[in-house]
Image (tube, rainbow, N blue to C red):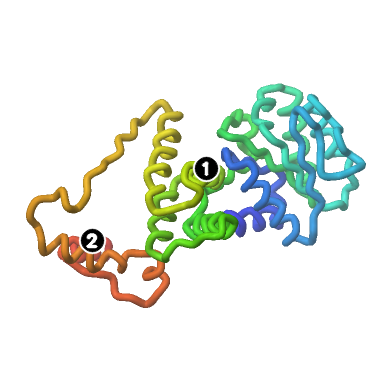
Amino acid sequence: MSFQQEFELMLRARYPILYVPTPEEERLEGAIATAAKNLGNRALYTWDFVDGYRGNANDQGVAVRNPLQALEHLEKLPTGTPVIAILRDFHRFLEDVAVARKLRNLGRLFKSQPKNIVITAAELSLPGELSEVVTVLEFPLPKVQEIKAELERLLGATGQSLDERNLDNLVRSCQGLSLERIRRVLARAIATHGEINPNDLDLVLEEKRQTIRQTQILDFYPTSEQITDIGGLDNLKDWLLRRGDAFSEKRASMVCPIPEGCCWRAFRARENP
């Protein structure tokens, strides 16, 4: 089940408070907006500490720098009005006893009303006393189809194209990055040489190195070795070069026999004893 399907299911099931930890705020809010539209054009409110509520002209700027008032405002909305309220970075206020108490009260109240609160944050930080009323949802990084669509959009914007093989290689190299980071690294490529080309794989790897470095836990060591650096094994290298396309995304969507060898047969035997 995709995030979109699971999220909409929980809204229909009236899970009152959802917590989605992700640094991809823009992409997540796009998914929430799609869910609001799919579920009968539910009213969508967005609150943050600096600007208060946005999305509704009558409530513009309400609860600026006041998280408790932000919750009280939701309680005052008409009972039968379907609402999805996005509370950005609200995890920072959950340790406040008044905010936590109000959130628990709303959790009980909204079970009988078509109202949902969605807490968005870059990290997960949930006090134990809220674990029974708050449901945590994982928001996965973009999948292959999303990355490919974004790359094709960027390529179209620059008036260029890549052949299927190079596009697949670039998509695979971008896996594990957020859409924002993908846009950033490709904007860097365009700024460097005016286009996106297969050699930009090195820029993608450098962006991944930056991501890993920010964790302060792991180190990233890029490799520059090529298949030609391997001595001998000429038959194996020739087979890999000839059959490499069989592992591409295009082949994965087609009815194509997967190349078999001793390692693949051993894997299948282990998975299906």
Quadrant of residue 9 in the image?
A: bottom right
Quadrant of residue 60 in the image?
A: top right
Of callouts 1 and 2, the N-terminal one:
1
In the image, residue 236 above or below residue 31:
below
Location of the N terminus by quadrant is bottom right
Reading the image, the residue beneath label 2 is 267
**Residue drawn at (66%, 32%), measured in percent from left and top?**
89
Residue 157 is left or right of residue 50, and the answer is left
Front: mark 1 or 2: 1
State the residue lying farthest toward the front.
193
Task: Give the SS element for disc 1.
Answer: helix
**Residue drawn at (65%, 26%), measured in percent from left and top?**
92
Residue 250 disc label: none
In the image, what residue type sits under mark 1?
Ala
Location of the C terminus by quadrant is bottom left
Foreground pick, 118 / 237: 237
Residue 62 is left or right of residue 13, and the answer is right
- Separation of disc 1 and disc 2 at Cα? 44 Å
Q: Position of residue 122 (x, y in %)?
A: 58, 35
Q: Position of residue 170 (x, y in %)?
A: 42, 54
Foreground pick, 130 / 145: 145
